[in-house]
Image (cartoon, rainbow, N blue to C red):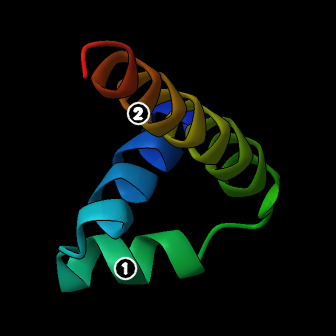
Amino acid sequence: MEYLNALKSVLAAMIGVQKADNHRRDFSQKSAKPFIVVGIIMTIAFVLFVYTLVQIVLSNS
């Protein structure tokens, strides 16, 4: 359940929206590990998505 909440928070942070209640809940957690793990995974996924998108666009031109 910690990782699901971390995923929601990381996704909200990536698009720049976060409720104040969720922000307080995130910072009251005992461990930052779920946020770090999910953040790294989401960053890698985003980079791979952008790379793939660029490759598709360049191959069609």
In which image quadrant can residue 12 be found?
A: bottom left
Q: Earlier in the sequence, mark 2 or mark 1?
A: 1
Mark drawn on residue 23: 1
**What amino acid does circle 1 point to?**
His
CA distance for labels 2 and 1: 34 Å
Q: Is residue 1 visible?
A: no
Foreground residue among 60 and 33: 60
Q: Residue at x 37, y 79 (%)?
A: 23
Looking at the rendering, in which quadrant would you find the C terminus?
top left
Residue 28, x across and y down, in percent: 58, 78
Residue 26, x across and y down, in percent: 50, 70
Q: Label 2 belongs to which residue?
A: 54
Q: Residues within 10 Å of mark 2 (few under 14, many from 20)?
A: few
**What amino acid does circle 2 point to?**
Val
Horizontal placement of 44 versus 15: left or right? right
Helix or strand or loop: what does disc 1 sit on?
A: helix
Mark drawn on residue 50: none
Q: Residue at x 76, y 43 (%)?
A: 37
Residue 46, x across and y down, in percent: 49, 40
Residue 30, placed above or below residue 48: below
Residue 60, placed above or below residue 45: above
Q: Residue at x 24, y 78 (%)?
A: 21
Helix or strand or loop: what does disc 2 sit on?
A: helix
Q: Is residue 44 visible?
A: yes
Residue 30, x across and y down, in percent: 76, 67
Horizontal placement of 22 versus 39: left or right? left
